Amino acid sequence: MAAGTASKVSDDFGIYSDRNKAMAFALFKRLSLDPNKYSSGSIESSDITSLFSNILHLSDHQVPLSNEQEIMKWVTFASSFPNDGDACLPALEHLNEDLNLKSVLLGNGLKPSEADIVVFSAVHSCVSHLDNTAVQKFPNVIRWMDYIQDKEDFGGVFAKIMVDKPEFIPIEIAKKKNSGDNKANGPSGKDSGANEKKKKTLEKETAEKDAESNISILNIQIAIIRKASKHPSADSLLVEEIDLGDGNLRQVVSGLAKFYSPEDLVNRRVVLVTNVKPGKLRDIMSAGLVLCASNEDHTVVEPLIPPEGALLGERVSFSGYDGKPEDVLNPKKKQLEKITPHLYTNEEGVATFKGIAFMTSAGPCKSSLTKASIK
């Protein structure tokens, strides 16, 4: 065997060994199994399919899995995943497409499955060696990997996949962080100080803009309309009593009378912004905003549709945006007005903020209207 070939085999074995160790460690923890029942040599030398199957048989009785057939499809995908350079790119493209509308590979909303552990272990080496240009081609894969490495414990075997994520910086902190001038002496110091001041001003403006249009300041929850009636003094408005699952009904006034009768909306599940400032609409108090998709000329309007299985009161989440919502939005800051231009449905009708899905434990919120604005 040539020296180069021997080196390649040695490198591959090291990659496979680390991959298998990390996968086994995460599965042992997930399935509450004793790792001492499995020899380290067997872990390092097994292929993915054999290792996964053998781990399941470690206990006296095989560990039952939900969606076992679907999990095994992903185990097969992981087993055949190429490890060499460009050869892995088509497989990553397939994975990226599959993750377009998902936070995790298999069901359960935001809870990773055994399939996520196995596939993450298989693709880590390839993804960690991609350059910045290649990484940008697989945004869903990178988002998913960032989520899985945060949720699962791989025993410290894998290097962390670094992801550039938008950072939420409250305006007050941004002002404090960027306050003060860089005072330097001499002509060059003046130029440097001016440039530094300009840079800080731009950073401050960007931080303030990002903070004000950050979706995490909204409290968006799953709800159901229990009662609906016509507004007594406005033909375009309906008055709804909406249930968030907390035992209380919240009164909301919506401009849906042109599109729906009150009877159409009773027992309809909706997506509700619950931290808008309560106020009167034509003398009727309203404490919420039903989010709706609409076509370009606003002739078709439809409340967003939560997935079956999403819990009443559950907060809608957005991957990469983990900030705490405001208690009550400040109308003077026009926070909602700065966010709604970034809300729209994609080609599949999935509701998104800047392309990131409105996600619940049961999947994304949707609409029958595609490429539509959301307000």
Image (cartoon, helix red, strand yellow):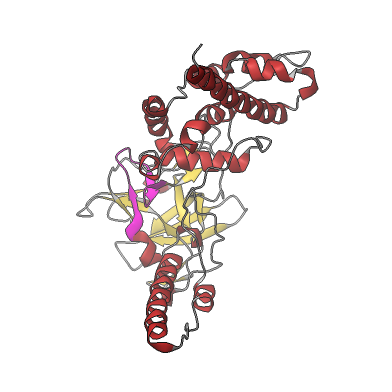
Give the extent of the magenta segment.
Answer: 341-356
**Residue 150 rendering spot, x and y as whole percentages:** 60, 43
How many marks do you count on the picture? 0
Q: Nearer the viewer, residue 27 or 186?
A: 186
- Position of 191 with respect to 127 (left or right) is left
Query: Residue 210 lies in what quarter of the image?
Result: bottom left
Q: Relative to residue 83, is residue 137 depicted above or below?
A: below
Residue at the farthest bottom position:
186
**Residue 48 rendering spot, x and y as whole percentages:** 58, 18
Q: Residue at x 39, y 85 (%)?
A: 190
For residue 250: magenta?
A: no
Residue at the farthest left position:
297
Q: Residue at x 58, y 15 (%)?
A: 47
Q: Nearer the viewer, residue 163 or 358?
A: 163
**Residue 301 rendering spot, x and y as whole percentages:** 29, 50
| Quarter occupied by the C terminus | bottom left
Q: Relative to residue 110, is residue 324 depicted above or below?
A: below
- Position of 157 with respect to 203 (left or right) is right
Residue at the farthest front position:
3
For residue 344: magenta?
A: yes
Q: Is residue 180 visible?
A: yes
Q: Relative to residue 86, is residue 153 depicted above or below?
A: below
Q: Is residue 263 visible?
A: no
Q: Residue at x 51, y 47 (%)?
A: 162
**Residue 176 rendering spot, x and y as whole percentages:** 53, 78
